[in-house]
Amino acid sequence: MVSMRMGLEMKMSQQLIMTPQLQQAIKLLQLSRIELEELIDQALIENPTLEIEAVEKDDETPAKEEDDAKNLMEEQSQLSYDDEWQNYIESGAGVIQEVRGKVNDSDESGNPLEATISKSASLADHLFWQLDISDFSEFEKEIAEYLIGNIDSEGYLSISIRELLETTPELLATVKDYYIKNEISHIPDEADCQRFDSKHQSAAKQDKKVKKSKKKTIPFEEEVTIDSAPEPIHIENEYCALIEAVLLRIQLFDPPGVATRDIKECLENQIIALKLKDSLAYKIIQENLNLLEQKDLKRIARLQKADIQEVVKAYQFITELEPKPGRPFGKEVTQYVIPDVFIFKRGSEYIVHMNQDSIPKLRINPYYQKLVTDNKDEKSQQKRLKSVEESDMTHQYLQEKIKSGDWLMKSIEQRQKTIFRVAKSILKHQYEFFEKGIDYLKPLVLKDVAEDIDVHESTVSRITTNKYIYTPQGIFELKYFFTSGIDQGDGDVISSKKIKDYIKKLIDTENKKKPYTDLQIKNELLTNADIKVARRTVAKYREAMNILPSNKRKKLF
């Protein structure tokens, strides 16, 4: 029988404990350049002992190095810049039209460049503007605001009406109050109830759901098809009907197809807006959307009992519709990539140069440093106990902030040194790439670089995340140079990126009416480039590059 007893015993063990300082240093390694700038700005706010070291004008060494880097960069790219600038001038795009208008004298001291910058309206702004000039009642406007707030950047309603009511108590209370006061007697039928649950799907979910036609209250009347039993109803159906009526009015807003729940409804509304509801294109979208995606026009012609030429014209018309109504309003500000490190070629040698721009050089404020390092004089020892305690607290606070600032500066310096070492190691391993291009990119794994610079693989992984390098071949992420390889059977290993590049070139130059199948691409790689790969490997790389299969790339005309 097992007995239990209590006692004391000693045991030796080892464990790794990460201090906050070590955690910060590891975090700094994986930060992008922009994130590092934000962290430095935040540290300057929170730590009063930190400050940006002013660059002395007499110090010409950093300026000289910076000028050398810029000159090297300009030497390699000046020709392309000149060509682009010449094309820009010849196109007439740089001509500024004369603008007549009143000039506000009070704004003379302002920045004239700001007067030329205008903020583009978002899709929500555009819809709210139309709501303001429409004849909606106050109740309808309140509902419309909730609906517009749930329209995504592509123009689709991203939530079901029932879910909107269940997750928004304020809206539900407003609808209930309106329903009771107006004594609304219309109750939707069972098909309406099901539509509220099944039809409200975002564009991202549409492929996973069964598409159904829908019965709308106002202004359209359509037949309803029920493919499955309705889900349990938790919200009164008449409340959903009120929301639905407002949604149908929003769907009449510009751009056509906005506030719809799937691609089918989106295309239908665009055709209705063009007053072509009786057209063959409308019937095809309603009945044969799945065949349209497969470009099986012959089968569509048989099912619609229409001539193949008419179906082709309808297909051409449908392809001109906008599947994402919110696309024109979803333009984001272009974020330009700023390289963390430059690799230039000077003569026959390559030079690795760190980009120190926009990363300020920090230092500890000399005044606070002096306060901490100075010893207390005899008078401070004779102060009252309360004052001594307050002085000790201030002294301890400054010590902690100085220590924190020192660690931050060392971590940033270590980060820059590690990036530099990784870049030099990549240059050594991928020298032929820098000389001749992507066709000479070799398979490389994190372990190779980690062993070369004597660090852990995880450190290399972190330091290559969201870091970019400028090379004579272009700007690349540091992770770009790490690639797997495929053994060709004779000891030769080819980089997967090289194979992807060949596949992309083949697809870009193929006959669009007779695109290459994966098997044909495999054979072309073997015949023209002497690259041995399996068909499934070609399919995997094609999907990784977001390239459609041959049957969906095929152009019918």
Image (spheres, rainbow, N blue to C red):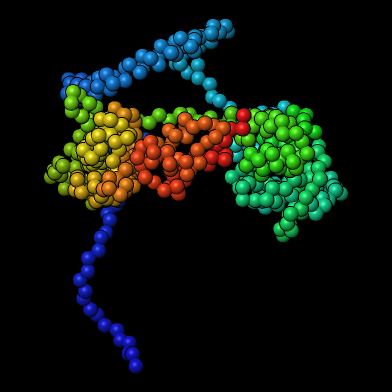
Closer to the camera, 434 or 240? 434
Residue 150 showing in the rendered view: no
Report whether 99 appears left or right of 413: right
Closer to the camera, 236 or 49? 236
Report whether 483 appears left or right of 152: left
Closer to the camera, 319 or 259? 319
Residue 482 in percent (x, y) is at: 31, 43
State the residue at coordinates (16%, 48%): 381
Q: Is residue 59 above or below residue 512?
A: above
Q: Is residue 246 above or below residue 111?
A: below
State the residue at coordinates (84%, 45%): 182
- Name the image quarter holding the C terminus: top right
Q: Is residue 197 above or below residue 126?
A: below
The quarter holding residue 109 reads top left
State the residue at coordinates (62%, 42%): 294
The quarter holding residue 258 reads top right
State the residue at coordinates (54%, 24%): 119
Residue 61 in percent (x, y) is at: 17, 23
Residue 94 showing in the rendered view: yes
Report whether 106 appears left or right of 162: left
